[in-house]
């Protein structure tokens, strides 16, 4: 495991976060978007998250040469929109830089999100994960998430149909 610290994101983190998300859009099925987000779209997303009171965390990873690398980011927000009946449920996102994958960064980001959710008195955290993303499925299972649903062939990307799995953990 690499040396990393998890902290709230700032405006200075937006370019690195955007680059990581756009890489996921273009090269993976972690996001079902096709087109990269622009800096303007990303800034709007960030401002809306802040205005809604949602957390955004980043991982600063100290490499062997002493430099600090942006290792990833994580957030959560509304599950199924801002409806009162869902106010104790959130859906989260975690993205980890390819340079530091499988070194515990995703785990640390997700643990920080779970701690934040507990501190806010939330009841459950939900993940929507592409069925081919074995690393993410394994990480979530290790942290107590269980599969609660499968939506077959709801996504289409890279000339193939994709299944979306829903994983959930109860916090109480």
Image (spheres, grey):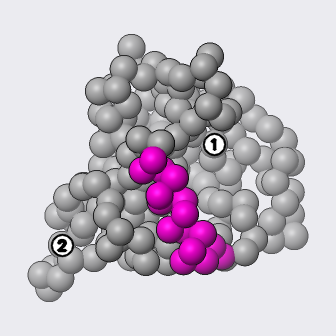
Query: In the image, 64: left or right of 74?
Result: left
In the image, residue 34 above or below residue 47: below
The residue depicted at 80 percent of the width and 71 percent of the height is 158
Residue 10 in the image: state x and y as whole percent.
31, 64
Residue range in magenta is: 36-51
In the image, residue 1 above or below residue 15: above
Q: Find numbered disc 2 in the image and state the secondary structure of the residue it sits on.
A: strand
Whether the residues at callouts 1 and 2 have beta carbons within 8 Å, the answer is no
Location of the C terminus (image quadrant):
top left
Task: Choose top left, top right, bottom left or bottom right for residue 30.
Answer: bottom right
Q: Is residue 129 magenta?
A: no
Residue 106 seen in this snapshot: no
Q: Find numbered disc 1 in the image and state the secondary structure of the residue it sits on.
A: strand
Location of the N terminus (image quadrant):
bottom left
Residue 159 seen in this snapshot: yes
Task: Choose top left, top right, bottom left or bottom right for residue 127.
Answer: top right
The residue depicted at 54 percent of the width and 23 percent of the height is 87
> As rendered, which of 12 and 47 lies closer to the eye?
47
Give the Cα separation between the discs numbered 1 and 2. Answer: 30 Å
Magenta residues, dominant SS class:
helix
Residue at mark 1: 128
Residue furthest bottom as drawn: 65
Mark 1: few/some/many CA within 10 Å (<14, 14-19, 20+): many
Residue at mark 2: 62
Residue 76 in the image: state x and y as whole percent.
48, 43
Q: Is residue 50 magenta?
A: yes
The residue depicted at 42 percent of the width and 50 percent of the height is 50
For marks 1 and 2, the one nearer the N-term is 2
> As rendered, which of 152 and 43 lies closer to the eye?
43
> As rendered, which of 38 and 16 lies closer to the eye?
38
């Amino acid at each position: 495991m690499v040396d990393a610290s998890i902290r709230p994101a700032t405006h200075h983190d937006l370019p690195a976060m955007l680059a990581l998300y756009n890489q996921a859009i273009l090269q993976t099925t972690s996001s079902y978007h096709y087109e990269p987000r622009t800096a303007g779209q990303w800034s709007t997303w960030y401002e809306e998250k802040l205005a809604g009171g949602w957390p955004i965390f980043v991982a600063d990873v100290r490499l062997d040469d002493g430099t600090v690398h942006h290792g990833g980011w994580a957030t959560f927000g509304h599950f199924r929109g801002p409806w009162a009946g869902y106010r104790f449920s959130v859906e989260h996102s975690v993205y980890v830089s390819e340079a530091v994958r499988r070194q515990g960064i995703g785990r640390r980001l997700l643990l920080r999100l779970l701690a934040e959710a507990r501190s806010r008195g939330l009841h459950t955290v939900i993940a929507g994960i592409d069925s081919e993303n074995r690393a993410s499925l394994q990480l979530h299972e290790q942290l107590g998430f269980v599969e609660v649903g499968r939506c077959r062939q709801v996504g289409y990307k890279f000339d193939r149909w994709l299944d979306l799995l829903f994983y959930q953990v109860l916090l109480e």
